[in-house]
Amino acid sequence: MPHRLNRTLSPIRVLQVEDNALDAELVLGELEADGLAYSARLVDDEASYLEALESFRPDIVLSDLSLPGFSGQRALELLRARDSDTPFIFVSATLGEEAAIEALRNGATDYILKQNPARMASAVRRALSEAEAERAAHRAEAELIRAQRFEALAMLAGGLSHDLRNLLQPLLLAGDSLLDYQDDPRLARLGSLVRDCGKRGLEMVQSMLSFARGARRAEQVRLGALTNALELLLQGSVPRAVAMDMTLDDPELTFEGNHTELQQCLLNLCLNAIQAMPDGGRLQITSSRCALPDDFFLDDEEPQEGEYLRLTVADTGHGMDEDTLERLFEPFFTTKQTGTGLGLLSCKRIVASHGGVMRVESEPGEGTAFHLYLPLALQDEADGAGSGEDWLQGEAERVLVVIEEAAQLSLLADMLDAYGYQAHGSQSGTVALQWIEAQGLPDVVVMDAEMNLFTGVRTLAALVDRGYAGPVLLLARPEAPPRLEELPSLEHLHVVDKPVTARGLLQTLRLALKNSEAT
């Protein structure tokens, strides 16, 4: 039957199981009189019923109780075996009270007597409404289960991240220490290998944690770590016919941003590029620094002159014409049959949230290049504090190092000794306080924020009570920063992300001592 127009409801698909065409027409007449728009299909045997369930995909089934060679109970059984939500209403002249109750127990939604069809339309409306509510409840329940599983994954990832960071910490410190032995090329190469393995492991941990929990705050993003994670995500997605080339001018470049969002943006652009090359081609990911003048920015962009990181994702695909380029960032505009038109809009939002801008270059048949311009903050004071390694050298300052893990404590103390400090190691806050009682206050304190018995906060409070007012370097995980409101008042408190590197710790240590001397 043809669709009937309706101002309030979309046409519903009604599957009728009935061997009497007149009775079937009377039922549909009730729906039409109530203003329900519908499309109907009539079947009277099991084979045609099963075919209709597959091809017609009804929103509701209206079935007689008994048919020659078939029955309403069998129809209900077949429906429920494949679908628990689609409403099923018995429409019969012979349905008694006991049979009606049994039908409802077996999964029927309602029953209507043919002698009293007046409530047919209201019963159909109610059944469809309840079915939609049931489906919504199922979706909500599934989303809740998914969220709970995701949260469990985040907790697991957080625990693994913490344990793996502790395992990687000695590798990073040992690698940096071995690099000091430049007179022995074998030790220097070994140090480089150990340090690089530790860094790669750390990047994998950070990537896992970012995807499991999401980035919760702005962070220092290292360009090499960002692109390494991108390579891991693209594994298995790049066809053999597509050659991927990644060229970075400075993998060690760091800038403030959201690692997870930038990863998502680059991944989306790369996948779009791959889809634009169905017959193969070349995918290029490059980075460079550039200075943007005031006239580079468009009318709707806020001009911000300065140095920028330019990330480019380029392909040799079919390209885009002018009309497509003009509409590229319109919501829901897409050239893909299964696309949503929101991917590039999301990329533009991510870049804009970093204070950056996007540009697109494309020619039909020549390929496309997306350029992301991300602003670079002024170089950290540490980068300009001096040239070479001389400025990192200590001047026999006494450093109290408080770390529970013996291997990390030993490596850190040895490294500080090698750079001209007098390092004393303690595996607990209570031992550190005993040392202070015997040796006096140190010049600087390096302390792990996560100690089990006498915590870092309690140890710092005890130090302040004993008159210590010097610099403190508190080592903490980026995803679990110390609650600064619980820390004692210290003018020179520096939080250092774990796992620490030798150079990063030495830089912070020199600057902390310099700032404390200035005050």
Image (spheres, rainbow, N blue to C red):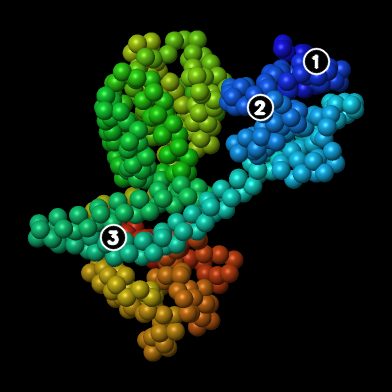
Q: Residue at x 13, y 60 (%)?
A: 187
Q: Are marks 2 and 3 in contact (CB under 8 Å)?
A: no
Q: Residue at x 42, y 39 (%)?
A: 263
The amino acid type of the residue labelled 2 equals Gly
Task: Specify the farthest residue to the bottom.
Answer: 438
Q: Which residue is mark 2?
A: 69
Image coordinates for residue 125, horizontal then vertical, percent: 80, 29
Q: Nearer the viewer, mark 2 or mark 1?
A: 2
Q: Secondary structure at mark 3?
A: helix
Residue that numbered label 1 is attached to: 22
In the displayed structure, does residue 462 sit left or right of residue 232? right
* Residue designated by label 3: 172
Q: Are marks 2 and 1 in contact (CB under 8 Å)?
A: no
Front residue (pair 484, 480)? 480
Earlier sequence position, callout 2 versus callout 3: 2
Residue 176 is drawn in which quadrant?
bottom left
Q: CA distance from mark 2 to mark 3?
A: 78 Å
Pinpoint residue 253: horizontal percent, then vertical percent: 34, 43
The residue nearer to you, when weighing 248 against 62, is 62
Q: Is residue 240 above or below residue 478?
A: above
Q: Residue at x 41, y 46 (%)?
A: 221
Q: Residue 18 appears at what percent x and percent y?
A: 73, 23
